[in-house]
Every structure is written in C-alpha cells, then in structure tokens.
Image (spheres, coloured by chain):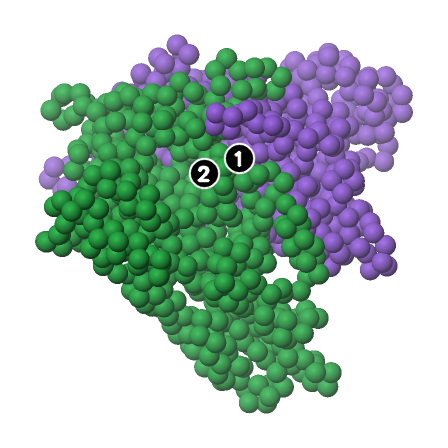
Chain colours: A purple, B green
C-alpha cells in the first residue's frame, strides 16, 4: 500500500513519469503503464479495480467489435440475474467443486438473514440452465443462441489489474443445440470468432487448440482456447469455448421434444472473453515508452499537437482548425493545453495513440503536417491535401505492423523440444512456447509443472503425424502439446 | 408461483394468448404483456428477473440513445467496483440510513469469512467518492464528468418486472464541480437530457420539477425529477438528478486546490435512469393488443408478412425479396414461418412492431404492399417505388403520434384542486396528476398521503404567482405541488 501511495503522489504532479524498464521488470512496467496511462487503478477494496475513462473507452471499442462479431454469427444478447442460489450452484458436481472455493456469498438482504444464501455469479451456467429449462420445449426452439455482457466475481487471492481481479467484466455465450455435432461445431465456430477478434481487431496472434483435462472448465466436456504470447515470454489464455455436452442439461432438466416425438436433452456450449483482453493488449504491444494501441480499438487514433510561438500563434491555431476538418472520419484529439510539446509527445506515446500530427510554422508554410507513427517512430511530412488518404493508409499499416511484430516475436519464441531436460533448460534460457510430445497422462503433465512451472497451454489443432515419445515418461506420445509459463 | 406456472404452461403452446383486459386489471395486463411479448420473465430467485432477448434489444436501443446524449454533453464512461465496504457506506449518515435496510451483504469470500462485510452497490456515491478523493487535486481536474452503466441491487419486499426488481440495470452519473452554481447547473442540465430522452426517443411526455424533502435522495441537498403518467393514471418517477452539495465531498474528503491557492471541497451531482424506463414505455403506450413501441427504439421497426397461396408462393417470396431490398435502412423482420398470417399479425401487434407490411398476390399485381400502422391501425396500399419515402415519413409520424396521444392523455388527467376533500374525491373518480397548493410542511404532506395514498410527485419549475392556501392546513401555500398515486 505504501508503494502505491508514493506512486499516487507522483501522479499528482501531473507529469509523465519514467516507467519501470520493460526489460528489467516486466511486471512492474505493466502496472506502471496501466496506472500512468490511466487505464485502471486499484481501489481500497482488495482485488477490485476501477476502470478509468480512458481504459473504459478502449474496452467500449473492443466490446463493440466483439459484440458485432457475436451478433453477425446469429446470437442475441440478454441479461440474467447476478445472484445464484446455493442449491442451484451445487447441482453440477464438477462445477461446484471448481467454483465454490472462490465465490462471494450473500447471506443478508437488508437486516434479514436469507433463508438460502446466494452467491454472486462467478459464471452463469447454473442460473441460465435453470431458466433455459423453462424456455425450451420443442426442437423448434433450437438452436438457442444467447450472449450476455456482465460483471462476474471470483474471490482471488492474488490479483493484478485486468489480468486477475475479484470482479471483472466479460461476455458469456450460452447456447443449446439439438445434436452433439451441432454443439461441437458451435464451440469451434465461436473459437474462430475469438481468433478473428484477437487477430483482426486487437492485432494479437493467437494459437487455437484443446485444453488438457486438468485445465478444462469445471463441468465441461471439452474446453477449447485461444492462447497469446506476452512480451515477457509468458502465455495468456485469451478466451475459451466449452463444449458442455449434456452435463448441465441433465442436472437442470433442459429437454426438448424432437421431430421424432421423443424427449431428449439438449447439447450445450458456453464461451467467454473478459477484460483480461485489455491486459493482453498492453502486454503484447507495449514498449519502453508505454502503450501501443491498434488503430481499430484505440480511443484516440490521432493526436494533433500545435507547435506554438508567440508570433504565429493565432495563425497556427487557425491552420490546425483546417487540418482537423480533414480528419472528420477519425477519433481525433486536439491537444492545445499549455503543456510543452515534448510533454505532449511523451503523454501521447504513453497512452499509445497510433498517430501524432505535429503542426508548426514550417508545416504551415509548406501546407503540410509532420506525421509520427507510434509503432515505428517514423516521422514524415504529409501535404494536407493528401492527409485523409495517407492517414487512412497509415492507420491500416499500423494495425498490420503491430500484428506482424507480435507474430514475429511469437515465432522467435516458439521452439520444439523432446525431453523434460530440454524444456527446463529452454525455459531457463528464453521463455516462450515449447512444443513437446506428451503421452496424455495427468502424472506427466504434473511432473512437467513441478519441474518447470510450465503448464500445457493447449493441444494445437494441427497435430503432426509422428508424435514421438512423451517428454516426461518416454511412452508413446498422444499429443503434440504446447507448454509455457502462463498468467 | 402456481399462477406463474400455469401461465408458463400456456406459453409453451406457442400461441398468442389473450391478454388480461387493460381496462379491467391494468396490473395483470402489464405482467401479461411483459411476459407474452418476451420482454422479461420471473426467475426462481425472488425479485430477480431475466431480461429476454427481445426486451434486451429494446434496452440496448434505449441505452444507445441515452448514452449518446450523455456523451454529447461532455461526459465519459468508466466502471467502478460492485462492492462497497460497510465502513464506506456508513460515512454519510443520511445515505446509510436510506440504503442500509435494503442492501445485500456479502459476508464470505469462498470459504473464508470476510474481515469486513461488503454490500453490493445499491448506488455508487460512496465507493466513487472514495476514489474521486484520490483523483482530484487541482481546479484543473474539474469539472469531473463521469457516467457508469451498471447493475445495482436493492433488496425489495414487493417486486414487479422492470418497475421494482431486486437487481436492475441503470446508468449513474457522478460529477464534481468547482462551484455551487456549476453543480446546480449540471443537475438541471442532466434533467433536461432526461426530458429529451423520454420525450424525443421514448415519446413519453414528462413533468420536470423538484422533489419534496421527504422524497429526495438519501444524502442529497436537492433532488430533481422527471415524472411520467401511466395509462392507469398512476405516476412513475422516470429519472432523478441530485444536487449533492458538499455532503459527500466532506465525508470522503474530496478537495481541490483552487486558483486562489486555497483548498476547497468540490460540489457534486449524481443522476440516474434505469430499466424502469422499459416499464414506463410499456405502461405509457401499450393498448389492449399489447405493446406499441416508438420507432426510434423498437428492436424491429417493420415486419414483412407474406400472404402465401400454393399457386403463387414462389412468385410472392421472390417479390418479397425485392420489397426487403427497399428497406435496407430499417430494422426489418421477415416472417416467413409456417404460422397463419392472422397469427403473425397478432404476434407483431403484441410485440409492438410499429409498421406491418402485408405482401400478397394482389399487392404483387399492383406493384404495392399493404401497410398497417400499429399506433392507429390505419391500413393503406403503398407503391413499392414510394416505399422508402413513405416508410420513413410514417415511422416519424408514428413517433410523433405516440407522443401526442400520451400528452393528450396526460392533459385529460391533469386537474387542479384546492382542498384535501377535492383531491380525495378527484382521485376516487379519476386517477391522474392533481395540482394543489401546499404549505411545504411534512405534516401536511403526510396527511395527504394518509388520506388519499397520493404523494407529491414534484414541485414543478413553473410556479404560479398566487399559490393560495395549503390544501391540508389552510395556511399560506409555498408551492404549487403535483399529487398523484405512484408506482
């Protein structure tokens, strides 16, 4: 707390502070960037954060993109209750075992003790299952394709801004299908939606695959995931989709009368992406100077900074007004505050604004602006008459460049090893994603974790024909697994 | 519960049911409409509702409109924690007295009892105040204009779908200002934003005014409100803005260094509109056949119903495809299900779709469609070549017509009385809004409520010069007050 307080008092000076060196202490750099760029901050309640206006504007843009993709694939939004009665949560055995240790329990409403305590939803399979059982009667009601944007609570012991907080925001899809195959297809389709959201909107390359049994969702039949690699070489689970089979349908009695006049249980899926994705964005693209935001989701795409001198002040501001008119199609900020240009440049860099346009007397004389890219630092003059076109092309190029850099980084950090010794030595030398053959046993998975702290991030969909011998036990491998240390 | 269950089993037949007669039992009609139009439904958890996809799509449109208005007036969105530690809630005496009896208390996180119990936010002044005190240092940080879209919980004894539920969705604005006047202006400005949202987007006329002391927000200096009149003659508080003065600033220590180098407490406001507004929409515009939704927020603005005969089936569907192409700018549903046209008409009416286009062989022959308005029932042929223009004009006209009808209804139901006897007799004869002179004392306010069940809905901003004698005590009146029975 005292460390936070002292940082806080530095914030009060209103200057851009020096960030912790990203190469020296990535964790401290991360917290510095999130707090100094005013994405989010701690609150007095342990593990709960406040998402500040700049961070929330970013989340709103991300949410709008993902919401559009979810609706395009035929889903509709709804809103289900925050509270789940204990008896409902307990119906699915694996589910309660997975979540009960980390839920918040409400025991009193006003001054009265509740007859049955209720938990704040950690995820909504149970409460939604109990509701779906009333809505679904016939095969005509299927598929039921519903998504919810909501807050959820998991009482975490160790928390970190965006990555692991007691309360977080997310979307959770909950669907019901007539056949096993349809449900499987849905969980794979939504994984693809997540992949495209991450790659096309956030410029974050992700690896798709299946989770091992020990890492799957409590109550699911199979969990699929998209995994991303952060700049410190640690993996981050960026989104998951679950093929729930009929586990929840059976305990919540979600049945339908099929065309053949027999009663059957539905097949379900669920899938979610959370505010964690904001953390992924920071840790994928950030650099020594702060955030680098992909233009598609950046709250501010362009900052215009006037370079003012007493003599030409009015003229320059007038010229800026003209420049701003050319930028109507973009999210633009005009920084005419009384800070120095250098201060403004540093602040825009810290906040990850993709493009900066400097407008001074010389620019004015030449009917141009000076354009600076946040991703590469490249600086060039652009004629105002070309501005709209060049800005559009450059924003697209930045979006692509951020993706390419992240992909190149991931490729550099992806290796193939054959034994546990190799894996341990590799991880000690350079953190990243390690492909290795695995027999499929939980014992070997645990042995790897024990020795290296690495977990199986996913079993990629692309599997080699020859898998070789398990890295831990030497038996025939069933899987080419990807191991990494993870958030 | 058994009544609900039996309704539920009727729902399962999938047919449009007969609604309770709106003139016979307005309350039962309301619940019928909300449930049969699939806006929302009860859940097994008392007082908690589920907002179904159709209701949520309506809410999303309403939210987008209001959010746009809030942002246009210079506010930004953020997200604050769901939980408030008991010690924070207790800091403002009136506030805790007002809210403590109805909050949900979390006492356990996972298996551990919390050191200090936390409540689920019933409103966020306390938690936001504690955060603002860290963010604000200088007059340069003011005004701070932040809004939050969130769920809140108030443990209600008697609940009704949308109108009063244990959990509800809302937006709550929380602003800080340098001067008393600025804060007052803000609370009046946001009241105007609410007025325009209700009148222009929802077609609901509202009365603006001040709340009496007994009706004001717990912890506020003054509460302003917009009040609407429902079809059963009962008033509904549609939105409130609060001039908080420095009450919360003092207990949460929200200070700033002013330009004159002295430290001062900020002046605050807060303001909110909730999912209650969906209930207001139903009860303002609904009729014997169900909902009537204003085109600006209707999830479906136009339903196209093909009238199919075996001989001309393919031709008609082909023609419909052409008609649909002309309607690209609208939210359109094409109902080609295998239900009968009559069933489809009734369902579209129940769901309040503003315009219905019937497309049969005769329409096809005449290059026309048959357009039916939900608000007036008017039916007319429209040439396809004129369709885009006529639809646009008609949707605008429906929006206006719904407002005009609601305003005419309110005017019919607004009366002026001089004495408590007159008020009681008036309310017995016809429920509505009753203007009456009031001395300003809580005793007289309570006496009126005791005798008539009517409360002061607001003290309108337009006050007559001569106010006469208080309806209850006969002393000189300070206010022209509006009394009504209310939700």
Residue sitting at x 29%, y 40%: B446
Query: Subunit of mark 1?
Result: A
Residue B99 drawn above or below residue A365: above
Looking at the rendered image, the quarter that the N terminus of chain A falls into is: top left
Residue sitting at x 17%, y 34%: B180
Q: CA distance from mark 2 to mark 1?
A: 9 Å
The residue lying furthest to the right in this view is A476
The residue singled out by tag 1 in the image is: A151
Residue sitting at x 33%, y 56%: B427
Q: Which quarter of the figure has residue B413?
A: bottom left
Residue A383 drawn above or below residue B398: above
Q: In front here: A155 or A282?
A: A155
- Marks 2 and 1 close (CB-CB < 8 Å): yes
What label sits on residue B150 in the rendered view? 2
Q: For the residues tagged 2 and 1, is the chain the same? A: no
Query: Subunit of mark 2?
Result: B
């Amino acid at each position: 707390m005292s460390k936070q307080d002292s940082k806080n008092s530095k914030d009060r000076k209103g200057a851009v502070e020096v960030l912790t060196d990203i190469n020296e202490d990535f964790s401290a750099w991360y917290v510095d960037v999130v707090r100094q760029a005013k994405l989010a901050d701690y609150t007095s309640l342990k593990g709960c954060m406040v998402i500040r206006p700049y961070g929330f504007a970013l989340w709103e843009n991300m949410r709008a993109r993902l919401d559009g993709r979810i609706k395009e694939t035929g889903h509709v939004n709804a809103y289900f209750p925050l509270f789940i009665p204990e008896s409902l949560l307990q119906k699915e055995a694996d589910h309660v075992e997975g979540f009960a240790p980390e839920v918040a329990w409400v025991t009193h409403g006003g001054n009265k003790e509740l007859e049955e305590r209720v938990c704040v939803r950690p995820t909504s399979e149970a409460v939604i299952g109990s509701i779906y059982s009333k809505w679904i009667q016939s095969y005509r009601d299927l598929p039921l394709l519903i998504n919810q944007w909501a807050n959820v609570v998991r009482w975490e012991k160790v928390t970190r801004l965006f990555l692991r907080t007691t309360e977080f925001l997310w979307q959770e899809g909950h669907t019901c299908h007539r056949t096993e195959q349809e449900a499987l297809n849905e969980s794979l389709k939504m994984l693809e939606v997540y992949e495209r959201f991450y790659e096309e909107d956030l410029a974050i390359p992700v690896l798709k695959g299946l989770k091992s049994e020990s890492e799957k969702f409590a109550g699911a039949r199979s969990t699929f995931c998209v995994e991303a690699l952060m700049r410190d070489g640690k993996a981050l689970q960026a989104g998951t989709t679950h093929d729930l089979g009929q586990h929840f349908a059976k305990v919540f009695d979600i049945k339908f009368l099929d065309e053949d006049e027999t009663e059957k249980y539905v097949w379900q899926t669920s899938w979610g992406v959370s505010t964690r994705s904001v953390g992924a964005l920071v840790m994928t693209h950030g650099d020594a100077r702060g955030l680098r935001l992909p233009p598609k989701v950046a709250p501010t795409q362009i900052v215009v900074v006037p370079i003012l001198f007493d003599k030409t002040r009015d003229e320059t501001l007038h010229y800026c007004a003209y420049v701003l008119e050319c930028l109507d199609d973009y999210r633009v900020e005009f920084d005419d505050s009384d800070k120095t240009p250098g201060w403004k440049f540093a602040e825009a860099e810290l906040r990850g604004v993709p493009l900066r346009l400097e407008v001074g007397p010389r620019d004015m004389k030449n009917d141009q602006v000076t354009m600076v890219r946040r991703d590469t630092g490249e600086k060039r003059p652009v004629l105002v008459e070309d501005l709209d076109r060049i800005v559009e092309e450059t924003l697209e190029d930045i979006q692509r460049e951020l993706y390419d850099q992240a992909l190149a980084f991931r490729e550099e950090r992806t290796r193939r090893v054959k034994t546990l010794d190799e894996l341990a030595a590799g991880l000690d030398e350079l953190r990243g994603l390690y492909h290795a053959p695995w027999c499929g046993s939980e014992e070997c998975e645990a042995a790897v974790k024990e020795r290296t702290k690495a977990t199986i991030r996913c079993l990629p969909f692309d599997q080699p024909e020859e898998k070789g011998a398990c890295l831990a036990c030497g038996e025939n491998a069933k899987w080419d697994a990807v191991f990494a240390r993870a958030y």
